[in-house]
């Protein structure tokens, strides 16, 4: 398995073969297991996993995360933000609030 950004030395004689595979990451969103296919997830992607579909303009979401691969490993995530997740076990808690 070649990690993102890892350098491979191909100067040795012989034939190299690379096989590509879709990576999957197992995360927890509001206590439910979910699978994503990217190391980096956005606030908006996690909101859709927690509360699928369209939302009224007066609905506001807040989100916390823990056990992330990115630094800091825990905290709050706002709209437009991203987090790098671990292969297994990053936890997100999403709350929906209706403003009047």
Image: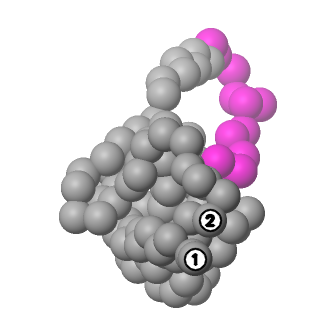
Task: Decide whether residue 3 is among the magenta residues.
Answer: no
Which residue is labeled 1 in the image?
100
The crowding category of the residue bearing disc 2, from other C-alpha atoms within 10 Å (few below 14, some 14 to 19, many at least 20), is: few
- The quadrant the C terminus occupies is bottom right
Q: Secondary structure at mark 2?
A: loop
Q: Position of residue 12 (x, y in %)?
A: 70, 29
Q: Nearer the viewer, residue 6 or 43?
A: 43
Q: Give residue 61's mark.
A: none
Query: Quick check: 7 left or right of 69?
Result: right
Residue 79 image-quadrant placement: bottom right
Above or below residue 4? Residue 97 is below
Marks 1,2: beta carbons within 8 A = yes
Q: Residue at x 31, y 47 (%)?
A: 34
Magenta region, residue range: 4-15
> Which residue ends up furthest to the right in the rendered image?
11
| Inter-mark Cα distance, 1 to 2 | 7 Å
Which residue is labeled 2 in the image?
58
Q: Residue at x 29, y 64 (%)?
A: 30
Q: Nearer the viewer, residue 54 or 72?
A: 54
């Amino acid at each position: 398995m070649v990690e993102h950004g890892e350098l491979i030395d191909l100067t040795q004689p012989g034939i190299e073969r690379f096989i590509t595979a879709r990576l999957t990451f197992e995360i927890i969103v509001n206590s439910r297991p979910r699978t994503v296919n990217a190391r980096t997830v956005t606030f908006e992607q996690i909101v859709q996993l927690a509360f699928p579909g369209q939302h009224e303009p007066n609905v506001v979401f807040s989100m916390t995360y823990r056990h992330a691969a990115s630094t800091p490993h825990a905290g709050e995530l706002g709209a437009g933000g991203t987090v790098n997740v671990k292969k297994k076990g990053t936890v997100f808690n999403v709350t929906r609030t209706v403003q009047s």
